[in-house]
Image (cartoon, rainbow, N blue to C red):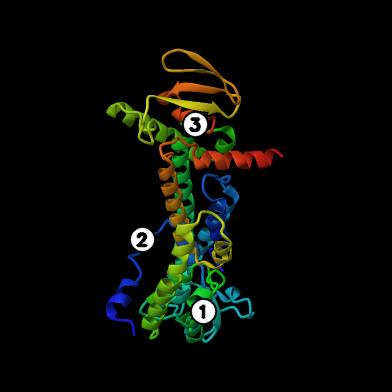
């Protein structure tokens, strides 16, 4: 049946679940596009045959057209859902993606990510608020955190340098460490 | 019998709203038994059971929903559509007898949404199908909410229930567990605790398994 390759793409993305992005499956996408091209060309032939007066080809045209639309939907959904994931990653990982995530993006997705970054930064500058800050209502200015990995030296906004060593505990400015908590480097102790 | 308003509320939502929805794409792949009414030229290879060049009239084939809908909806009908087995009278009776005992995941992980889509074919049994879907959902919902809203993670009962859930029911279960979890956190006063994002955690897990 037509549309099976395209379904594979959708299934692959579905399987990957939340928070992980499989490598862009260039090979499969190309195969779908090839199938679509073949369907389209056959349809054009059939339509011109029908115009020339040969009967009985309309059913085939309809079937192929439905398959074309289906393939289109799968491809668009594949690209769109990947884009949504990449957008969410901007909020989780910050403006720089880890290398192993980056490797799974294709060239266009990378440039999209860059542009999204820029628009977001521009918007946050224009309203004067860091939107990635204070994802939950802050209760205090300083919070206690424990370090989960050896991170190294970290310079806080007021210029102090703290050494973030595994299992060490610090009292830090909330604004300084919220990103590090989201990235799983620090743990918030309550 | 179902009244008109119940049936109306189960009608499929306008096309386009879930165009990019992966689950809807997968649900549309569900196979529907169809019979061809006219000849379709040059596409005989789609029917693995025959060697002929064309699809002849009266050929029976299982087509995915997305194709069946297109070939059936136009004024000139190319195929006629039958109900898939699990939506026929025999299964409806099983569901009516005891909806909670049925393994809906086995009947098709998208049991409800495919059932809703089938209504588009204008089958004479439509009101009955709609009614069965609704009643099944209502009967099963009670136990599902009972289990998902009272205990977090893995009571024995929910372990036996989970594999039998339809995809939509799974979502309901997950959402109400999430709600319960947040309620517990609120009671302990740790709702304002900052946590690392799920994406990052999953990413790290994957990395760790790859490294090994």
Read off the chain for label 2: B
The answer, for residue B82, to whether it is visible in the render is no
Q: For mark 1, what is the residue?
A: B86
Front of the two marks 1 and 2 = 1
Spatial separation of the CA atoms under disc 1 and disc 2: 27 Å
Read off the chain for label 1: B
Identify the image quadrant of the N terminus of chain B: bottom left
The answer, for residue A92, to whether it is visible in the render is yes
Q: Is residue B149 above or below residue B207?
A: below
The residue carrying pointer 1 sits among few (fewer than 14), some (14 to 19) or many (20 or more) residues within 10 Å by Cα, namely some
Spatial separation of the CA atoms under disc 3 and disc 1: 52 Å
Q: Tell me, for residue B16, which label it has, or none.
A: 2
* Dot 2 and dot 3 within a common chain: no
Camera-side residue of A35 and A124: A124
Q: For mark 3, what is the residue?
A: A189
Read off the chain for label 3: A
x 45%, y 78%: residue = A54
x 54%, y 51%: residue = A17
B135 sits left or right of A152 in the view = left
The extreme front residue here reads B188
Front of the two marks 2 and 3 = 3
Residue B121: percent from left, percent from top: 40, 78
The residue carrying pointer 2 sits among few (fewer than 14), some (14 to 19) or many (20 or more) residues within 10 Å by Cα, namely few
Q: State if disc 2 and disc 1 touch (CB < 8 Å).
A: no
Camera-side residue of A181 and A31: A181
């Amino acid at each position: 049946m037509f549309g099976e390759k395209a379904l594979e793409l959708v299934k692959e993305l579905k399987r990957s679940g939340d928070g992980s992005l499989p490598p862009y499956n260039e090979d499969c996408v190309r195969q779908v596009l090839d199938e679509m091209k073949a369907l389209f060309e056959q349809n054009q032939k059939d339509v011109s045959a029908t115009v020339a007066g040969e009967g009985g080809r309309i059913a085939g045209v309809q079937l192929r057209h439905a398959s074309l639309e289906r393939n289109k939907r799968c491809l668009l959904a594949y690209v769109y859902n990947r884009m949504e994931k990449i957008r969410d990653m901007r909020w989780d990982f910050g403006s720089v993606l880890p290398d192993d995530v980056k490797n799974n993006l294709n060239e266009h997705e990378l440039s999209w990510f860059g542009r999204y970054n820029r628009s977001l930064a521009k918007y946050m500058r224009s309203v004067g608020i860091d939107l990635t800050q204070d994802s939950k209502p802050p209760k205090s200015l300083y919070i206690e955190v424990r370090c989960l990995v050896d991170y190294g030296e970290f310079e806080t906004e007021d210029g102090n340098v703290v050494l973030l060593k595994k299992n060490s505990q610090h009292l830090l400015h909330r604004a300084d460490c919220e990103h590090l908590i989201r990235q799983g480097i620090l743990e918030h102790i309550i | 019998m179902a009244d008109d308003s119940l049936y109306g509320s189960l009608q499929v939502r306008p096309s386009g709203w879930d165009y990019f929805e992966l689950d809807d794409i997968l649900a549309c792949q569900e196979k529907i038994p169809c019979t061809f009414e006219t000849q379709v030229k040059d596409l005989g290879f789609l029917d693995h059971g025959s060697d002929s060049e064309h699809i002849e009239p009266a050929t029976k084939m299982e087509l995915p929903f997305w194709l069946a809908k297109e070939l059936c909806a136009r004024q000139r009908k190319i195929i006629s559509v039958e109900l898939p087995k699990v939506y026929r009278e025999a299964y409806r009776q099983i569901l009516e007898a005891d909806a909670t005992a049925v393994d809906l995941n086995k009947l098709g992980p998208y049991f409800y949404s495919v059932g809703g889509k089938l209504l588009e074919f204008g089958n004479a049994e439509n009101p009955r199908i709609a009614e069965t879907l609704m009643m099944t959902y209502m009967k099963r919902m009670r136990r599902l909410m009972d289990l998902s809203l009272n205990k977090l993670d893995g009571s024995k009962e929910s372990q036996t229930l989970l594999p039998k859930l339809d995809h939509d029911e799974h979502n309901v279960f997950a959402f109400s567990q999430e709600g319960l979890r947040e309620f517990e956190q609120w009671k302990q006063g740790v709702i304002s605790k900052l946590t690392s994002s799920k994406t990052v955690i999953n990413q790290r897990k994957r990395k760790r398994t790859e490294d090994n």
